[in-house]
Amino acid sequence: MQRFLLAVDTLNTFIGKLFAWTIVILTLAICYEVFCRYALRAPTTWAYDVSYMLYGTLFMMAGAYTLARNGHVRGDFLYRNWPVKRQALVDLILYFVFFFPGIIALIYSGWNYFYLSYLLNEHSSFSPDGPMIWPFKGLIPLTGLLMFLQGVVEVVRCAIALKTGQWPERLHDVEEMEKMILEEAANKSDAEAIGRGSL
């Protein structure tokens, strides 16, 4: 089971890191637009479309990666003080009450939104060049599918934590600074307690 969990984490990590490069492309495009607009007095006709499509792509394709890293916002000041089994139970309830209904709606509506755009060969109406917009809209149901898959993995993690009282292992490519500070403080406290005990 752990192999399946880490395989899905690995997939979403790869996709998240791959699409993270869109921030570089977005930065270059915006810098080029600013240069053309203010230095050459000849703004581009495509910068607006490129900027919102690249930003939207980055935002959407980072969702499953963030969930795999357990990085979405929650009330950590309460949550981190709970026992693991309570954390898992609350997470499990919230996945079924809010997460899965929302993601299923995203997949269903996103597919219809994309498919209609594809049938119409929709182009952007925000700029004279009007680039194709249906490939961008195709990312909506894809994002939903990746989030759904990662959500299944998180539910399995909750079930394991409820049974064992320990969270299963995750892939770790980055750590939040707050978590590192808390672990360092706990280690320092443990070392001081051992030091006092040996006196």
Image: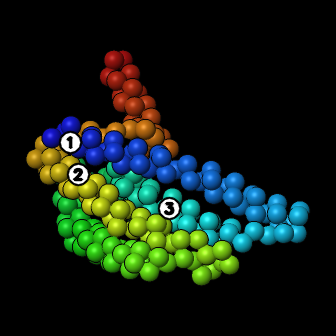
Q: Give the Cα separation between the discs numbered 1 and 2.
A: 8 Å
> Residue 153 shows which numbered tag?
2
Picture residue at 21% right of the left edge, 37% below the top: 3
Dot 2: what SS?
helix
Picture residue at 63% right of the left edge, 53% below the top: 25
Closer to us: 116 or 34: 116
| Mark with earlier residue (3, 2) | 3
> Which x, y percent locates residue 169?
26, 38
Amino acid type at mark 1 = Phe
Extreme residue in the top direction: 199
- Left or right position of 45 against 75: right
Residue 15 visible in rendering = yes
Closer to us: 148 or 47: 47
> Which x, y percent locates residue 12?
36, 48
Picture residue at 67% right of the left edge, 55% below the top: 27
| Mark with earlier residue (1, 2) | 1
Residue 86 visible in rendering = no
Give residue 31's quadrant in the image: bottom right
> Residue 57 shows which numbered tag?
3
Question: Mark 1 touching mark 2, by CB under 8 A?
Answer: yes
Amino acid type at mark 2 = Val
Closer to us: 117 or 56: 117
| Mark with earlier residue (3, 1) | 1
The residue under label 1 is: 4
